[in-house]
Amino acid sequence: MSKQNKGPRKCLDCGSSRVTTKVGAYRMKLADSWAVTVQDAIITTCEGCAGVGVGFQNLDGLMRAIAAAVVAKPTRLAAEEIKFLRTHLGYSGVQLAKLLGVGPPTVSRWENGHEPIGAVPDRLLRALDVIRDGAENFDVEALAAIGDKPGTPLRLRVRIKDGVWQAAA
Ligand SMILES: [Zn+2]
């Protein structure tokens, strides 16, 4: 456990000190129709007002782990994943369109699910993430095996081990 979870706490909503913290699984919603399971979320429950709060160690590392799993998937990126990667990288739709050499409406159609992303921009978007986040575990050769069918969002479970978030089997 990290140090931040030790010591007395007070509920930010009601001021009660009857607050308990545990580590457990949490379904983190990344889009309307996509959530990933975070196994080691920090879940705080207040007995005073029954409020529940959820926090994560190393949130940036958690987002990187999700992105790494997405860019390694063997099927075409789904609409939700394209939007997730774009926002993870900190780009607007217009910025990403310029980087990928397409018009902004095209990025909108990908993200709305109105048009599947093409094979080339799919791979280029993955490469942008790998360039940004680091390529330690990225299998470049796997790009050759990405299927042509539009994919559905990844079913993913992540856990933290020795301070590092990773996809769990
Ligand atoms: Zn409370």
Image (spheres, grey):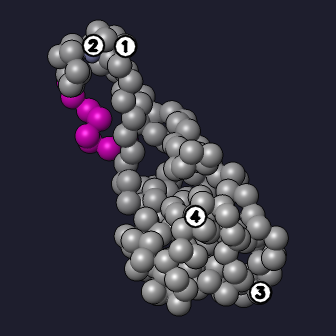
Mark 2–mark 1 distance (CA, rounded to whole Å): 10 Å
Kind of residue indicated by mark 3:
Ala
Earlier sequence position, callout 4 versus callout 3: 4
Secondary structure at numbered mark 3: helix
Q: Which mark is residue 144?
A: 3
Figure quadrant, ligand 1: top left
Mark 1–mark 4 distance (CA, rounded to whole Å): 37 Å
> Residue at image x 32%, y 44%?
2
| Label 1 near ligand 1 (CB < 8 Å) | yes
Earlier sequence position, callout 1 versus callout 3: 1
Q: Which mark is residue 50?
A: 1
Secondary structure at numbered mark 1: loop
Label 4 sits on residue: 111
Label 2 sits on residue: 18
Kind of residue indicated by mark 1:
Ala
Mark 2–mark 4 distance (CA, rounded to whole Å): 43 Å
Q: Kindly report the secondary structure that dominates the magenta region of the rendered protein.
A: loop
Q: Is residue 85 left or right of residue 7?
A: right
